[in-house]
Amino acid sequence: AQKITQTQPGMFVQEKEAVTLDCTYDTSDQSYGLFWYKQPSSGEMIFLIYQGSYDEQNATEGRYSLNFQKARKSANLVISASQLGDSAMYFCARRGGAGGTSYGKLTFGQGTILTVHP
Amino acid sequence: DAGITQSPRYKITETGRQVTLMCHQTWSHSYMFWYRQDLGHGLRLIYYSAAADITDKGEVPDGYVVSRSKTENFPLTLESATRSQTSVYFCASSSAGAFQETQYFGPGTRLLVL
């Protein structure tokens, strides 16, 4: 199975500081997409940011950026200037490209619980 | 805009009963998915559908049945519920299957099987 690994079950950060959530992945696909989702305590899954395997620049969306290192197969999420509302579970996921066994499907990591302290 | 909705949001049932979870999306997305979320496992794909009348198994399909007669609906049926199917179920959709297409999730259904 092409696995997604999030090695940090829980992370703590002080409000207004930056935090990095780790994600590494296995894949034999030539093309693929990497996604991060946020799941607050209310339970919904909120899409945050996307990085394509062919993208040369790291993706950014407001306070979220993705530190993509293709050779290392890592796609770490960086949250700058943390806010109390960032406290949530964060999931890394990968979607395979055409021709691969995981085409169209998302594979998720087990998640990291982020707690932001005031 | 309604987006993607799931019903019921909460369900309690008994072992052996049939249960159907509904999913409806208003975007006319081609692809739809069912996931279950359990502690320690993240989200795992149960079934997915690339279009009306086209469905395929995911990682954990046993004990589940799906159908997709209309593009906007993708019901998930537990034919004979077991306690191990107690979980949170998420429906998702995307406009296409390409790797760059984002999947958008419904609010989830919490299912308890007694």
Image: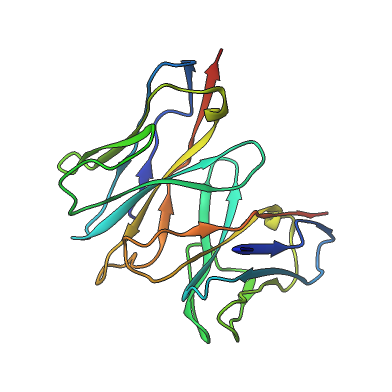
Vertical position of residue A57 compared to residue A11: above or below = below
- Figure coloring: rainbow
Vertical position of residue A94 compared to residue A81: above or below = below
Image x and y of residue A62, in percent: 38, 36
Image x and y of residue A30, in percent: 18, 60
Query: Which image quadrant: the N terminus of chain B?
Result: bottom right
For image coordinates 64% across by 70% down, the residue present is B24
Image x and y of residue A53, in percent: 22, 53
Is residue A4 left or right of A98 when viewed as pictured? right
Q: Residue furthest front?
A: B1
Query: Which image quadrant: the C terminus of chain B?
Result: bottom right
Vertical position of residue A116 compared to residue A77: above or below = above
Which of the 4 quarters of the picture holds residue B4? bottom right
Numbered label tally: 0
Is residue B107 left or right of A17 when viewed as pictured? right
B93, B27: nearer the viewer? B27
For image coordinates 39% across by 31% down, the residue present is A63
For image coordinates 28% across by 43% down, the residue present is A59
Image x and y of residue B40, in percent: 55, 40
A115, B80: nearer the viewer? A115
